[in-house]
Every structure is written in C-alpha cells, then in structure tokens.
Image (cartoon, rainbow, N blue to C red):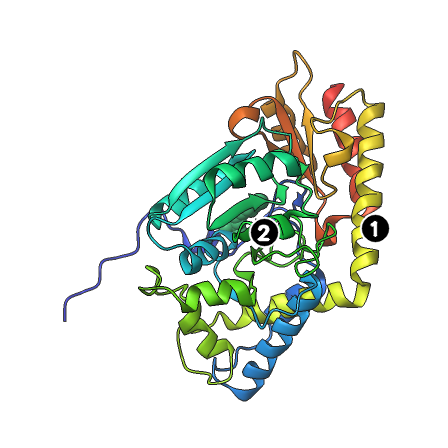
Amino acid sequence: MLAPLPISDRYRLETAQLDLPPRLLLGPGPANVHPRVLGALGIPPVGHLDPTFLALMDEVKDLLRYAWQTDNELTIAVSGTGSAAMEATLANVVEPEDVVLVGVKGYFGHRLVDMASRYRADVRKITKPWGEVFSLEEIKTALETHRPKVLAIVHAETSTGACQPLEGLGELCHQYDCLLLVDTVTSLGGVPLYIDEWGIDLAYSCSQKGLGCPPGASPFTMSPRAVDKLNNRSNPPANWYLDMSLLTKYWGETRVYHHTAPINMNYGIREALRLVAEEGLAERWQRHRTNAELLWAGLKELNLTCHVDENYRLPTLTTVRIPEGVDGKAVSSKLLNEYNIEIAGGLGELGGKVWRIGLMGYNSRPENVILLLNALEKVLHS
Ligand SMILES: *Cc1c(COP(=O)(O)O)cnc(C)c1O
C-alpha cells in the first residue's frame, strides 16, 4: 500500500476547532441567522426521497407562495445561492436570439446582462445612474423600441439602496407580449412585494438576506405564462442542473430523483419562512420600515447623508455617503475589529463613495440600530 502523504505542516490540529468572532452582520448579506433557524439546521438529515422530506418540500412551496403573494404552482427553493436562482430564471425562458431587455441601475443589473448573454440572448440595456430608478414611462419607451421577449429588472438594488417601483410594470410588459423577470433578492421578506398582483412572471431570491437563514436554498417562482414559454422551447435549457422541466418532476407529483436536495438547508428555509408567516407579512414589512427610519434619523443626527432619495430608499439596505476627508475603509475596518459589526463599502460607480448598511430579516431590530449608530459615532469621532 502506498503511504498517504502527511497533512500539511500549515494545518495544526490543535487550532482546527472553529472559533469565530460573534459578528453582527449589518452589511448587504449574509445577515445573522434566527436562533430557531440555526436549531432547525442541526436536525439530522433524512433521505431526499423520504416521505417526511417530500412533505416538507410541499410546506416550503406553500410558505414561499405566501411570502411572495403568489399562486404559482412552480414555486420552489433552488439548491444554491441567489445567483443560482437568478440563473434559473434566465436559463429556462431565454432561447438563443431572444431579445432580453435589462434595466441596469446597479451591480446586479450588470450580472443579469452577463448571464443573459451567456444564454445567447440578444441583450439590450437601459441604464440609470446608480441610486436612481426607472419611471414607467421610460420602460414603456424601451419596450416600444426593443420589443423584448423578457424584461429583467432588480427590485431592490443592494449595490445602491434604491427600490424600483413595480406597480403597473407587469401589465405594461404583457401589453407588449413580454415576460417580466424580477430580482427580489433583497426585497423578499422585508419590502412589500406582490408577485401575482404586480404581474411578475419570474422571480428569484436568496435565503441569507431578508429571510434570516444561511445562504444555500434560494426561492424561485415562475408564472403559468413563463411555464408556457419553457414548454414551447425548441431546445431544452442549456443548463441541466437548473432545468425546471426536470426539477418540477422532483418538486411536483412524480418525485423523480434529479439531484440530492440540500436537506438541512431546506429545514432551515422552512423554519425561516415559518417565522415570516407567524409574524405576518404586513407586520414584517412595517418592522423593516420602522427600523430603517430609526437608522435614517440617527444618521442625520451624525450629519451623514443617505445616497438615495427617501421616496425610493430601501428599508433593507441603506447607502450612506462617506463624508469628505473620511477614510471609508478605515471606518468599516474599525467597526469590524473593535465592535464586531460588519458593514460594507460601495461597488462599481459607488466604490469608495458610500457605506452600505443592511437591516435584513432577523437583524432588523431597534437594538441593532442603536448599537451601530453608537459605534459609528465613536469611530467617526476617534
Ligand atoms: C445578493 C444578491 C444577489 C446574489 O445572491 P447570492 O446569494 O450572493 O448568489 C443577486 N441580486 C441581488 C440584488 C443581491 O443583493
């Protein structure tokens, strides 16, 4: 027998036990996990075809339909992070040469452009400065010009802190025979959102932002209109793992094995969604708004300015302008190293210009706001 190579000298067994600092995660995600979700994650896994697990999958679907306010049959948790569910929306409905119009007003709009191009869509873009949103009129003009099969837009742009109004958009898209695809990663569970009422055909989210769960199981929903487009494709989606015509056999009636579901992540997201249902959506949305307003008032007292107009400001993520002469990176490092509080800096157009503060899901609580404001005041005046 060949002797196995010894373990690297760099790996010392005595330090292998995980010992991480108790961070308060007030950045753009992940957010802290609710204790009840942590408890659920530690329940021993059953098999992915065990009748008890199949029943749990049905519960996840029902709970997701409530959180998203939809009756869509095809509503599941995709195995993977938000980007996997994002890719699932495009992979299933985009055929090569389809015109896909993307509203780009931040980092995640660019990601939609990149992904749609990889599925060989004819991608068209409309853009706005980071921190602004599109008007219905601007989108109507673009639909008229480009006549897309799909309009993709981000509801809650985590890179800018702006919330895109969606009312009336679905109706408009359907007049132009276009599917409406919406990124709800930083809105689900924190910001008013009505998939059916607003005529949204495809949406995706993640578990680690507004839902208070670790990353790894990502909400996905598709309207009957979008399912029709999938069923009428001339070739199957170019992505096997995310092909809904295969996945629905596992999540639907026939229960055919597709891939091994991440069992414990589904325990986690089920508990997170149960917490949403227990609290009630209206109450949860209000809680996020109240705590965000507490944060905005406190920032004002510190003479700090929010980047986004109050009318479009997201309750789940606030971008704060870094004042002239202040080293933004040094402030966030101090918050992390001295106070165990994580916030983030800006991306893209807002790189070096803003801090990003998240109050998402379980973390949207007044005591966290006060803790952050006090620490920020100390750091800014030190
Ligand atoms: C976080 C985020 C994503 C990507 O989700 P991951 O879980 O990081 O893959 C997509 N869109 C928006 C708006 C996000 O904030």
The residue sitting at 64% across, 57% down in the picture is 199
Which of 91 and 241 lies nearest the eye of the viewer?
A: 91
Circle 1 residue: 286
The residue sitting at 76% across, 18% down in the picture is 381
The residue sitting at 48% across, 51% down in the picture is 83
Q: In which quarter of the image is residue 122?
A: top left
- What is the three-letter code of the residue carrying label 2? Gln
Query: Which residue ends up furthest to the left in the rendered image?
Result: 1
Image position of 211 (left or right of 287): left
Q: In which quarter of the image is residue 69?
A: bottom right
The C terminus lies in quadrant: top right
- What is the three-letter code of the residue carrying label 1? Gln
Identify whether 71 is placed above or below 215. below
Residue 84 picture location, percent across and down: 46, 56
Sequence-first disc among 2 and 1: 2
Residue 301 picture location, percent across and down: 85, 24
Instruction: Tell me if residue 134 can be seen.
Output: no
